[in-house]
Image (spheres, rainbow, N blue to C red):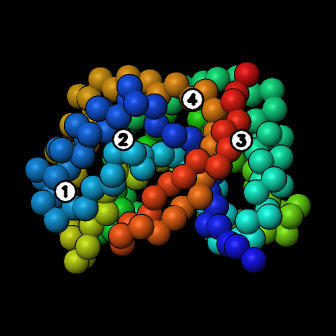
Amino acid sequence: MEKIRFFVALEIPEENKPQFLAIQEQLKSLIPSEHLVVEDQLHLTLAFIGEQEATLQDSLVQILQKATANIPQFSVTPGYLDGFPNIHHPEVLWVGVKGDIDKVLLIRERIKDGLGNLQLAVDERRFIPHITVGKIKNGFLVSQELEAKLQEFMEQGNFTPINITSIKLFASVPEGGLHKHNTLAEIKLI
């Protein structure tokens, strides 16, 4: 049986990518050891499903259709910079979003319910809507001074809203040490 590494995400439209590239350029100038996320892989993950049988795809599409039922198009805006596990010792740097977060959270909860109904593992950690922009290795320490510079940059960013018109089911395919994201299905919002 063929297996696919599935995940569900809100894709960043082309017109919004330049503002993320500007964020990445600023990060790279302040944190030279940062590994930037490739432009065509910028997204806001709603659910990582992981490696499953390919035959699950139709059921996942049905879950996404139910999760987006009666949800109109909406927008979110880049708001702040943070990191996992935290901003001071980040392994991952990400941009948190503000705006219509209630719609993001509702879709996510509906997806979790659908995955639970299929007896699939559901990530129960606190969900923070974000877009990963970079990864850092070697235990880099973000000083308070550097954190202040990063937050100042974000506050002065005048970022344009990201219009969310659909959610997508993706396959994450290993390719040359990275993962390529192939769209398997797109569910349009009303």
Task: Name the kind of residue labelled 1 in the image.
Answer: Gln
Q: Quadrant of residue 164?
A: top right
The outermost residue toward the right is 117
**Residue 4 image offset from top left, x and y in percent:** 65, 67
As helix, strand or loop, the secondary structure at mark 3 comes to helix
Task: Name the kind of residue labelled 4 in the image.
Answer: Ile
Q: Distance between the Cα atoms at labels 4 and 1?
A: 34 Å
Q: Nearer the viewer, mark 4 or mark 1?
A: 4
Q: Earlier in the sequence, mark 3 or mark 2?
A: 2
| Residue shown at 76% from the left, 35% from the top | 68
Q: Quadrant of residue 88?
A: bottom left
Residue 73, placed above or below residue 59: above
| Residue shown at 39% from the left, 45% from the top | 40
Q: Earlier in the sequence, mark 1 or mark 2?
A: 2
Name the one closer to the observer, 101 or 21.
21
**Residue 122 image offset from top left, x and y in percent:** 72, 65
160 with respect to 67 (left or right): left
Q: Which numbered marker is on residue 96?
A: none
Q: Nearer the viewer, mark 2 or mark 4?
A: 4
Q: Nearer the viewer, mark 3 or mark 1?
A: 3
**Residue 95 image offset from top left, x and y in percent:** 38, 45
Q: Distance between the Cα atoms at labels 2 and 4?
A: 19 Å
Residue labelled with disc 1: 144
Residue labelled with disc 2: 80
Task: Name the kind of residue labelled 3 in the image.
Answer: Ile
Q: Distance between the Cα atoms at labels 3 and 2?
A: 22 Å
| Residue shown at 45% from the left, 58% from the top | 180
Residue labelled with disc 4: 164
